[in-house]
Image (cartoon, rainbow, N blue to C red):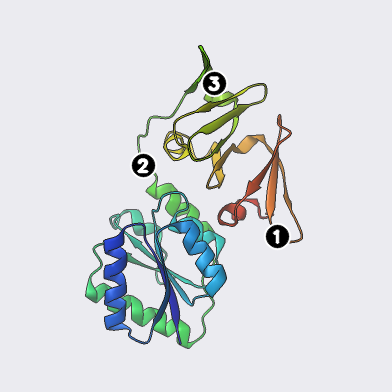
Amino acid sequence: MTTAIIADDEDLPRKDLRRMLNDLWPELDIIAECEHGADALEAIHQHHPDIAFLDIRMPGMTGLDVANATKGRCHAVFTTAYDNHALEAFSAGAIDYLLKPISRERLVDAIARLKARLEVKATPTDLSSLMQELDKRLRPQNVERIRWISASVGDTIKMFPIDKILFFTSDEKYTRVVCTDDEAHVRKPLKEIIEGLDPEVFWQIHRSVVVRADAIAKAHRDELGKVTVELRGSKEVLKVSQAYAWRFKPM
C-alpha cells in the first residue's frame, strides 16, 4: 500500500487535501497529518512514507527545510499559496507542487505523476539546489534589516550592533543575544528577529538557534550522524538539527 503524510500549519487546507485524496486516491494510506515542519520530519523518519505533501511555508521549520533534511526518503509534493512566478524554480517534471486553493483537476494530474514514479520505482529527486533557489525566490522582498539589537539589563539598555552578534538562541519567553564579549536576553521571539536578518549572513541551524555564518569555525558529525558547530569567538558548541544538517555537507 502506498503511504503519505500531509504537513500544513492551517487546519482547513490540510483537511481539504486529505478529503480530496481520500476521494481521488482511496488506496492511498495517509498515515500522519502534521501541523509543523518538525512534526513532519519526525513522521517521515518514523513511518517512512512514500510521499510527503509539504506546505512550503510553515512557522519554524518550513516544507523546504523538511525536504532538504529528508531528500531521498520519499517523493515530495509542495503545497503553496504563492503565485506561479515564484514557482518558476521548479524544474519541469522533477517534483510537483499544488497551488492553493488546490483544484481537483490539478490534484488528479499530480496523482497520475506520483503513481507513474512509484510504478517504475523512481528514486526521489535530490532537491538541494532547487530548495536553495526556491528559498531565495520566496523570501520577502524589501524587508528592513535589523541594524541594532537593544536589550534591557536592570536599569541599563545595552546596544548590540548586528555585525558584532555571533548567534541567537531562544527558549519559550526570551531570545539570547551573544557577542564575543557580552550577551543579553530580549523579549522578542526568535522567529520575529529572523525576519529582519539577512539570510546570507545569518543561518538558522536549529528551530531555536541562528548563527553568523562567517563565524562558524568548524562542524562536527558524531557516530550517530548528529552535527554540532563551533564558532570563532565563542566556547559554546551549538547543535544542528536534522532539518539544517544539509548546510554542512562537504563540497
Q: CA distance from mark 2 to mark 1?
A: 33 Å
The residue carrying mark 1 is 225
How packed mark 1 is, by other alpha carbons closer than 10 Å (few <14, some 14-19, many 20 or more), is: few
Q: Residue at x 33, y 85 (%)?
A: 26
Identify the secondary structure beneath mark 3.
strand
Image location of residue 5, percent across then percent down: 43, 71
Which callout, 2 or 3, points at the residue further toward the start of the chain? Answer: 2
Residue drawn at the location 31% of the way across and 58% of the way down? 10
Ranked by sequence position, the earlier of labels 3 and 1 is 3
| Label 2 CA crowd tier, 10 Å (few <14, some 14–19, many 20+) | few
Residue topped by disc 2:
140
Residue 130 in view: no
Figure label count: 3
Where's residue 211, x and y in %?
59, 38
Q: CA distance from mark 3 to mark 1?
A: 35 Å
Distance between mark 2 and mark 3 Cα atoms: 24 Å
